[in-house]
Image (cartoon, grey):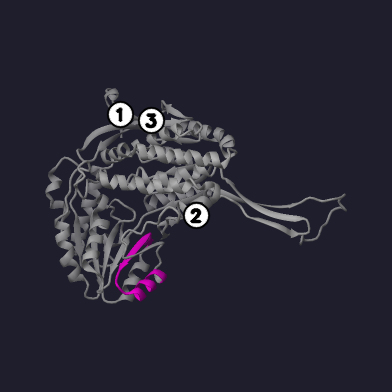
């Protein structure tokens, strides 16, 4: 953490967006934002105070009555315009992601696409929130339902997807008639203000979308405020548990998506070239900083050696470097601290006795000034090792060998996380049994990263999701709305008096 530098005018400042415009903060705390490929400071972001949070909540609360009563077609048209504007500025947004996070440009652009798909889904909000109608459920009695906004919503988003994850939240929340406050990661906050600018250009009224930068001070102020109705969070499991507990105890509805340890099960009959390609892309893409990254390989029977024969040359051929070079396969990690944390896990794996086949600590790229780490591969790990049990969130793959298909299923099901998993096989019966028997929220069959499209919903099981509803898709619409059911009767004459029996039709 750093105080605001005297020469901050020479550096980009990332402030709050409240009530339809940039706001000078009440806080005097600032943090540095780094270009992860060079290690150089590229911006400073304000660490908001409780007074800043209060201003954002006041703006969101004031805008709520008018926006929630805005005809749903007008709300949908804002989403149509937002989609058009994001597509117009897509290259600029991708470059900003690459500078602050480090993703290779093609990966950054792909993350924008997955966010855009949710904006497209939100464009259909007039249909998505239609209620049901039942005529003449009793004599002269009709029943109908409607879905209405829940109020002021907040989104707390992680560093690894500064474009995609916010787009998984606020388009649906706003389209459903809510107002929204985004608290992005302080490590790469630049996209948050881009969303605010584009929404304003799309015609969104002031106060409907607000941005509060900051750290735990801002988060806790939002979680404890009575004006907040719903909280959406994506991040690590310890923080997800804190968010869920705090917000729930304060009477809010919560969807808190936590960590993961995603397994890819390889059966002996699998296409080993296909499986190896999948592992390289899903394990090392985005430097492993994905909650749906594959980090555990489960080699069944005699599949391990043929898989390694294909996998090792592909790892050696990976091109690693700055994300601004679109020919690279993998960029740096987000910060020096996170890079060192991942390096420490490699140390731990060695100490625990796993066989280190590829050591990312010795890669030539680590001599550069950026936050780089090469790809790492462990073999012969056991289920009690920390490199298998814990989420590393870096370019580290760990292989466990098992003898049978049932042993593989039990291994996956015994893990505390249940976010995503995949199986590679040509056996349809085994794939079907895997999909039905695995205790994981998102399952891939010969698909390594089974992130559902926007018209389905994203969410894990066990300690990967806290709350009852997954994010975006139909579950997202239900999360950002409340069901109201009306039973209506229009009497034709003077009422006969009170009726004290249970109403029937």
Closer to the camera in the image, 22 or 412: 22
Query: Helix or strand or loop: what does disc 2 sit on?
Result: helix
- Residue 251 visible: no
Which numbered tag is attached to residue 12? 1
The answer to which of marks 2 and 3 sits earlier in the sequence is 3
Residue 370: horizontal and vertical position, in percent? 19, 41
Compared across the picture, whether 425 is left or right of 365 comes to right
Closer to the camera in the image, 490 or 244: 490
The residue at 20%/62% (across/down) is 378
User: Where does label 2 land, which residue?
Assistant: 475
Residue contact at pointers 2 and 3, CB within 8 angstroms: no
Query: Mark 2 to mark 1: distance in Å?
Result: 38 Å
Quadrant containing the N terminus is top left
The answer to which of marks 2 and 1 sits earlier in the sequence is 1
Which quadrant of the figure has residue 350? Answer: bottom left
Disc nearest the viewer among 2 and 1? 2
For mark 1, does the 10 Å Cα neighbourhood hold few (<14), some (14 to 19), or many (20 or more) residues? some
Disc nearest the viewer among 2 and 3? 2
User: Where does label 3 land, which residue?
Assistant: 15
Query: Helix or strand or loop: what does disc 3 sit on?
Result: loop
For mark 2, does the 10 Å Cα neighbourhood hold few (<14), some (14 to 19), or many (20 or more) residues? some
Note whether 343 is above or below 23 in the view shown: below
Asked whether residue 427 is drawn in magenta, I would say: yes
Query: Mark 3 to mark 1: distance in Å?
Result: 10 Å
Residue 84: horizontal and vertical position, in percent? 41, 39
Residue contact at pointers 3 and 1, CB within 8 angstroms: no
Which quadrant of the figure has residue 349? Answer: bottom left
Please provide the residue range marked out in magenta: 416-436
Which quadrant of the figure has residue 317? Answer: bottom left
Closer to the camera in the image, 100 or 378: 100
Residue 284: horizontal and vertical position, in percent? 24, 54
């Amino acid at each position: 953490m750093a105080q605001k530098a005297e020469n901050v005018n020479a550096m980009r400042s990332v402030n709050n967006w409240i009530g339809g415009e940039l706001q000078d903060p009440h806080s005097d705390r600032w943090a540095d934002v780094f270009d992860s490929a060079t290690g150089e400071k590229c911006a400073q972001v304000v660490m908001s105070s409780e007074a800043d949070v209060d201003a954002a909540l006041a703006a969101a609360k004031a805008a709520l009555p008018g926006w929630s009563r805005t005809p749903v077609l007008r709300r949908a048209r804002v989403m149509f315009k937002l989609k058009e504007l994001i597509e117009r500025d897509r290259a600029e947004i991708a470059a900003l992601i690459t500078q602050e996070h480090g993703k290779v440009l093609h990966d950054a652009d792909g993350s924008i696409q997955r966010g855009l798909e949710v904006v497209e889904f939100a464009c259909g909000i007039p249909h998505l929130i239609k209620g049901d109608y039942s005529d003449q459920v009793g004599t002269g009695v009709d029943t109908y339902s409607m879905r209405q906004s829940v109020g002021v919503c907040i989104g707390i988003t992680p560093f690894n997807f500064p474009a995609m994850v916010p787009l998984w939240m606020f388009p649906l929340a706003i389209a459903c008639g809510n107002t929204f406050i985004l608290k992005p990661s302080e490590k790469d906050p630049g996209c948050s203000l881009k969303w605010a600018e584009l929404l304003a250009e799309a015609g969104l009224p002031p106060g409907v979308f607000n941005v509060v930068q900051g750290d735990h001070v801002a988060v806790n102020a939002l979680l404890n405020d009575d004006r907040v109705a719903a909280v959406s969070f994506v991040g690590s499991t310890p923080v997800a548990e804190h968010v869920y507990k705090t917000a729930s105890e304060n009477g809010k509805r919560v969807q808190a998506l936590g960590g993961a340890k995603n397994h890819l099960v390889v059966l002996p009959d699998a296409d080993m070239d296909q499986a190896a390609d999948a592992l390289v892309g899903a394990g090392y893409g985005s430097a492993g900083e994905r909650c749906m990254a594959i980090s555990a390989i489960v080699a069944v029977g005699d599949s391990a050696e043929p898989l390694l024969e294909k996998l090792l040359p592909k790892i050696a051929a990976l091109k690693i470097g700055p994300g601004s070079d679109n020919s690279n396969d993998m960029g740096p990690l987000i910060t020096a601290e996170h890079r060192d944390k991942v390096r420490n896990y490699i140390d731990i794996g060695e100490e625990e006795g796993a066989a280190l086949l590829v050591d990312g600590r010795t890669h030539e790229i680590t001599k550069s000034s950026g936050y780089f780490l090469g790809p790492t591969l462990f073999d012969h790990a056991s289920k009690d090792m920390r490199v298998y049990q814990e989420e590393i969130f870096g370019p580290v793959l760990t292989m466990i060998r098992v003898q049978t298909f049932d042993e593989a299923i039990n291994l996956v099901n015994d893990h505390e996380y249940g976010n995503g998993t995949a199986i590679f096989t040509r056996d349809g019966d085994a794939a079907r049994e895997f999909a039905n028997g695995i205790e994981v929220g998102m399952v891939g069959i010969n698909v390594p990263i089974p992130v559902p499209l926007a018209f389905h919903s994203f969410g894990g099981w066990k300690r990967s999701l806290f709350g009852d509803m997954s994010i975006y898709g139909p579950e997202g619409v239900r999360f950002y709305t409340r069901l109201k059911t009306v039973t209506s009767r229009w009497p034709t004459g003077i009422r006969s008096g009170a009726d004290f029996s249970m109403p029937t039709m």
